[in-house]
Image: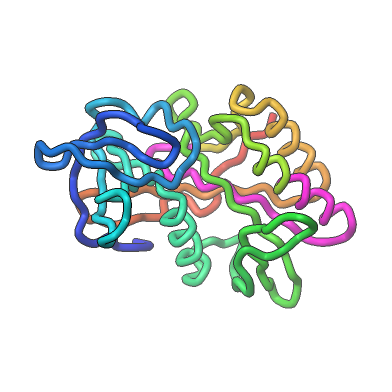
Amino acid sequence: MLDRIEDVVECSIIKRVNRFVVEVLVKNCHAMAHINNTGRLSGYIVRGRKAYCVRNNPGRKTGYKLFAVSEEDLAVLIDTRMQMKAFEIAVYKNMIPWLKGCKIIRRNAKLGSSRIDYLFDCMGSRIYVEVKSAVLRGGKHYAMYPDCPTMRGRKHINEIINYVLNGGLGAIVFIAAMPYVKAFKPYECGDPEVPTLIRRAYEAGVMVKAISLYYDPQASAVFLDDPDLEVELD
């Protein structure tokens, strides 16, 4: 287990109002829930789909935060902050073998004209690590990214590539925050430029990795499934 989520409220999705708000049904009452994942999430934000919320603090524009969507007996963790918190816990607990002995020394670290998610110290070597949420399902067992055009994603990947080409160390980590996945691969139709950039990053020496995790409603907790999920770039 990576993280336990308290005071979860089961809800049902009605519709996505805008990038940041989803209308939900909680105990037969209509409510608005904040969502921080700006991807299209077209396979998940579907009318009638069971989902999971937590109450927002008083004073917020929405009464709830939508963080996960049901998938069979488990759930997809769509909340990007919870994904990153789970990743950080896994790093701290040395549960990710290719980051063993590494520690986070800075979040939102400046690199060029961008802010990269993390700066790590790995046994004396510094490595910039950019994390991307991969919650688009391809076929039955693939997690994919991106599900829509992303200028921000392109910029971050380019920044990492340039840093590595100039002698630095960098990694791009895809968080497949869904159950029942066996591999990650780029989604060619979401943003045609991004898969090319990911392959270019790999060829330049950027570490391209993926992990899989999921939310278990019965335990009300996030679990790490595969700390070194297969990455397919062909």
Residue 140 x %, y %? 42, 26
Tally of numbered tags: 0
Residue 74 x %, y %? 28, 42
| For residue 34, above or below residue 143 | below
Is residue 6 visible in the rendered image? The answer is: yes
Q: What segment is highlighted magenta in the picture? A: 157-182
Residue 93 x %, y %? 47, 71
Residue 169 among those drawn in magenta: yes
Q: Going by the image, does 183 lie left or right of 44?
A: right
Q: Which quadrant of the structure image shows residue 152? A: top right
Q: Which residue occupies the foreground of this view, 120 or 183? A: 120
Image quarter where the N terminus lies is: bottom left
Q: Residue at x 69, y 32 (%)?
A: 195
| For residue 185, above or below residue 207 | above
Residue 224 x %, y %? 41, 55
Q: Residue at x 45, y 62 (%)?
A: 85
Q: Identify the residue at the far bottom of this view.
A: 124
Q: Going by the image, does 154 lie left or right of 61?
A: right
Q: Identify the residue at the far right of this view.
A: 166
Q: Residue at x 69, y 29 (%)?
A: 234
Q: Residue at x 63, y 71 (%)?
A: 106
Q: Identify the residue at the far left of this view.
A: 28
Residue 162 among those drawn in magenta: yes
Q: Which residue occupies the foreground of this view, 59 or 75? A: 59
Is residue 216 visible in the rendered image? The answer is: no
The colour scheme of the drawn protein is rainbow
| For residue 9, above or below residue 151 | below
